[in-house]
Amino acid sequence: MTKFVKNSEIQSNWYEIDAKNAVVGRLAAIISKIIRGKNKTTYTPHMDHGDFVVVKNIEQLKFTGKKFQNKKYYKHTGYPGGIKELTPEKLDQKKPGEVLKLAVKRMLPGGVLGRKQLTKLKIYTGTNHPHAAQNPKIIELDKLNNKNIIRN
């Protein structure tokens, strides 16, 4: 018989990741697993079991190859001929951290649950952040094994 966890039994942890020299897509995959709660044994797809993730040093993120200049993000205004395109380079100048947020957002489910889970991602430039009171566990990306992201 499958045991389902109630909302009152869910505990959220806080994690801190230093994005220095991290590749955007690989970092986004790790973050999305933590935010969705896939690293927990109580994972259920239709519930929010995820943890909070604080990402610092966002200005030192990297892209592989020439994606920083050549990759394009598209959006449509809703008017005829209203397609807009933006490169990560221009987006990073306007809003630092938005590139990582978009990458994580596209790895989460669409709809209400995905929007709720995305609010658990906190992105900051530099090394300081206002979440020190939550005592986040530090995740060192260079020491992670590809198979085991985080186990509780």
Image (cartoon, rainbow, N blue to C red):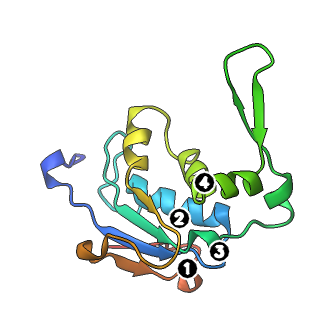
Vertical placement of residue 2 versus 19, above or below: above
Vertical placement of residue 3 versus 21, above or below: above
Q: Residues within 10 Å of mark 1 (few under 14, many from 20)?
A: some
Q: Which residue is mark 1?
A: 141
* Residue 45 falls left or right of residue 59: left
- In this view, the residue farthest toward the top is 80
Q: CA distance from mark 3 to mark 4?
A: 14 Å
Q: Secondary structure at mark 1?
A: helix
Can residue 18 be seen here? The reply is yes
Q: Which residue is mark 4?
A: 95
Which residue appears at 81% of the width and 18% of the height?
Answer: 81
- In this view, the residue farthest toward the front is 94
Label 2 is placed on what type of residue? Ile
Find residue 151 and name its label. Answer: none
Label 3 is placed on what type of residue? Gln
Q: Quadrant of the C terminus?
A: bottom left
Q: Which residue is mark 3?
A: 60
**Badge 4 vs badge 2, beta-carbon distance below 8 Å:** no
Percent position of residue 93, x then y:
69, 57
Label 4 is placed on what type of residue? Lys
